[in-house]
Amino acid sequence: MTESTSYEVIAEYLTAGIRSAYLAVRQAERQSVSELRLNSGRAAAMVFPDKIMYLTQSGLTANPRNTSAVTVMPTDISAIVDALSHYSIHSCSRQLCEGVFVLRRGVRVGLSGSFNSEGCMTDITGLNFRISRNVQGCADEVYKLVAESGQGVVICGGVNSGKTTILRDLCRMVGSTRKAALVDERNEIACTNSGIIENDVGMLTNVLTGCSRAKGIVSAVRTLSPDFIFCDEISTDEDAAAIGENVGCGVKFCATVHGTSFQDLQKRSVMKTLLNSGIFGYAVILEGGGSPGKIREIRRLGDDI
């Protein structure tokens, strides 16, 4: 059996009308699409790095008001949510509170709608499928920095800039020769499924998923003796504290953080101490959503930042 791509995994959850149009998209266009956005009462949208297109049964159109565009109905949203929850929505309180489902092959499905008094999503009106891809070799330049210096790196980028893809490939390369631990909180990097790690994250890499970054970092240091720890999307003071408290154990950290420039990083309280502490040897700034994976700047971190 041929292994499903992340694009094909998404198709498994779609209703018949949307699925047929989605699978009719040409292979060449599938290679660069990053998102499928489904909002009740609107045309089904496909997001590319440089454009937005809309599904029809005969191809893509740039006009969302094209009479042949596939319109997403409330019944479509309801049926897809049922499929995402394996027809047991009440057992998915964590996903509903976090506003996201994580599928095979690292596909993430963001939810929009109303939150109830308990902080969980109800009356879901929109679904945003983000397509995950492995791009081996995309972290070559970053890996060279890490291998030559023996230091960690922080990868900074905006939405759809490719930072998670680069981190995954960097983990693959480092974890092929050094002891590594990957703290994969939402299971979108290693894509563990039924105990099988679907993505290549390195022969020597231990994967921790389903826990917070802070808890995973502490657990990895205490029990897995890693040389490097990888984690995605540092965003809280708890994340920063866990990194800062455990760096003295000789572990190097490679992580991503949301931001559009180095100056943006310096303004964020969660990153300020980390940047000045010597935890990371380099900051890699990505170009942005229009050029995913493209490096704009590499900055050597030191006392002068």
Image (cartoon, rainbow, N blue to C red):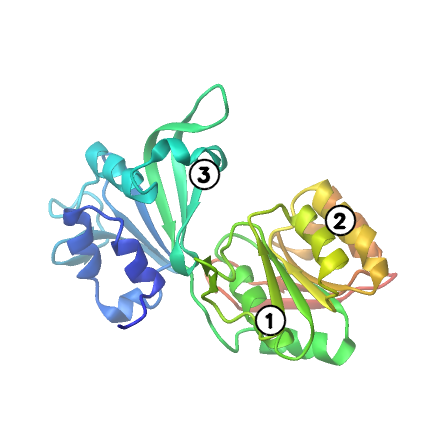
Label 2, label 3: how far apart the Cα atoms are: 25 Å
Disc 1 is placed on an element classified as helix
Q: Residue drawn 22% across and 45% down?
A: 64
Disc 3 is placed on an element classified as helix
Q: Residue drawn 62% across and 73% down?
A: 204
Q: Is residue 218 visible?
A: yes
Q: Is residue 268 visible?
A: no
Q: Which of disc 1 and disc 2 is earlier in sequence?
A: 1
Q: Quadrant of the C terminus?
A: bottom right
Horizontal and vertical percent position of residue 123: 34, 26
Disc 2 is placed on an element classified as helix
Q: Which of disc 1 and disc 3 is earlier in sequence?
A: 3
**Residue linked to disc 1:** 170
**Residue linked to disc 2:** 242
Q: Residue drawn 52% across and 67% down?
A: 293
Q: Quadrant of the N terminus?
A: bottom left
Q: Label 1 sits on what residue type?
A: Leu
Dividing the picture into quadrants, the one containing residue 110 is top left
Label 3, label 1: how far apart the Cα atoms are: 28 Å
Q: Residue drawn 88% across and 61% down?
A: 303
Q: Is 236 on the left-hand or right-hand side of 100?
A: right
**Residue linked to disc 3:** 95
Dividing the picture into quadrants, the one containing residue 83 is top left
Label 2, label 1: how far apart the Cα atoms are: 21 Å
